[in-house]
Amino acid sequence: MRPIRGAVLVSISSLALVAPQLGGAQELSRATPVIGSAETDFPRTPVTVGDTRLFLNGDVRLEYDSNIYALPNDVTSDFKIVAAPALNAVLEKERYRMTGWANARFERFLDATTENSTAASVGATGEYRVRGTDAIAALVAYERAVESRGDPEARISPTTGPRLIDISRAELGYTRTGTRVGFRVRGTAARFDHVSAVDRERDHDSFSLSGRLRYLLTDLSSAFAELFYNRRNFALPFDLSGVNRDSDTVGGRIGIAIDPGGVLRGEAGAGIFRFNPADPSLPSRTGFSAQAALIYQPRARLAFTLDGFHGDAATVRSGAYAREDTRVRLGVQQEVRRNLHWQAGAVYRRSAFLGTSVVERTLGGYGEVEYLVNRRVAVALSGRYADRNSNRPGEDFERFRSALELRLQF
């Protein structure tokens, strides 16, 4: 799926409810800037309506794609124009904070008009501080997502456009931040509704519950242990191959979290999970779970990033009872001058379809140079490359994309 740039990211105590980014995990796109951007280097002056602050930003991009359908042979290249406006609203009082957003992303191809798409996201987060150490947070959101052609299990036919998915999501969480010991609990419910009736077997509801216990080790670091439970309920009792895809997953992780303030920040954890399918013909299994998001910043203008994930993912592929994904992204960002930034990175992805012999491996890279013209305008030149190898015929591809982008903020 394709991410919309500019969605609000709100860290609510340690709960960190996040505005949806329209599928950023799948795209080999730019990492979120951590050392400088137009927003940090040139603080915006919002429009004020009563006590509410309004922020408007948007991107306009001309992009070349060497393989728009992500096919192994007879590839088609094309140019497209992408426009992505975003409106954010913030209301903050002594004991509560509310944030709302509305984003859209319009993609229009010059020749392959069947690939034209419109994505959107609207939602709100809220936090109420019960007292100094306790907070309740909530999120509600709706998203019209567009599947990326390079995703695992994505459409490969050039005669139909990419899948459209309506995603509704709600979260509720409670956080206590103690002097030495703290905890958080969070519940999430989401509905994935594919627009096309052909994709009815992919529609499902997802429910999750997690709890984390934190113990402060130093002023900047803490150890944590967390438990999680995930439930997937598919709309159809059986998929096209006659399999019940409903499942439960339980697991736990332990790890280290490092708060901002030093040269290293972020968190990393590892543990195990137990996957229990509802269909008696499918085997249960125990797997390894890991997740990391770390930033190493040895100097004020230089940062290295690591994002990683390994664990269970949903699948409806015939013959597969589960999918195990591994994703790793290594990046570097530098502020050459106050108004000139660059970033580059390498991405690795592996998807194994358990119950079959199918394994997909994707290697990729990205790079970008951004020049801040003034407090409201930035210009960027970027490139992305991906090479996927699969032992299933017809799913290999090689793809290069480059873009010239105008970024605006008000």
Image (cartoon, helix red, strand yellow):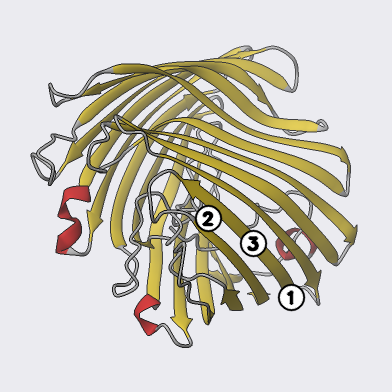
Tell me which amino acid carries mark 1: Val
Asked whether the viewer can see residue 213, the reply is: no
Quadrant showing the C terminus: bottom right
Local crowd size for mark 2, using a 10 Å CA cut-off: few (<14), some (14–19), many (≥20): some
Q: Quadrant of residue 241?
A: top left
Residue 128 is situated, as x and y percent measured from the top left of the image, at: 45, 39
Asked whether the viewer can see residue 74, the reply is: yes
Q: Is residue 348 left or right of residue 183?
A: right
Name the residue at 63% across, 46% down.
Answer: 347
Q: CA distance from mark 3 to mark 2?
A: 10 Å
Image height of 18 relative to 14, above or below: below
Name the residue at 20% across, 57% down.
Answer: 199
Q: Is residue 344 left or right of residue 83?
A: right
Residue 102 is situated, as x and y percent measured from the top left of the image, at: 44, 66
Mark 1 or 3, nearer chain start: 1
* Residue 127 or residue 147, whichever sits in front: 147
Name the front one of labels 1 and 3: 3
Mark 3 or 2, nearer chain start: 2
Q: Quadrant of residue 181?
A: top right
Q: Is residue 37 left or right of residue 32?
A: right
Per the image, label 3 sits on a secondary structure element best described as: strand
* Residue 351 or residue 44, whichever sits in front: 351
Q: CA distance from mark 1 to mark 3?
A: 17 Å
Mark 1 or 2, nearer chain start: 2
User: Which residue position is annotated with label 2?
Assistant: 27
Local crowd size for mark 3, using a 10 Å CA cut-off: few (<14), some (14–19), many (≥20): many
* Residue 196 or residue 73, whichever sits in front: 73
Name the residue at 39% across, 62% down.
Answer: 122
Residue 290 is situated, as x and y percent measured from the top left of the image, at: 53, 25
Q: CA distance from mark 1 to mark 2?
A: 21 Å
Tell me which amino acid carries mark 2: Glu
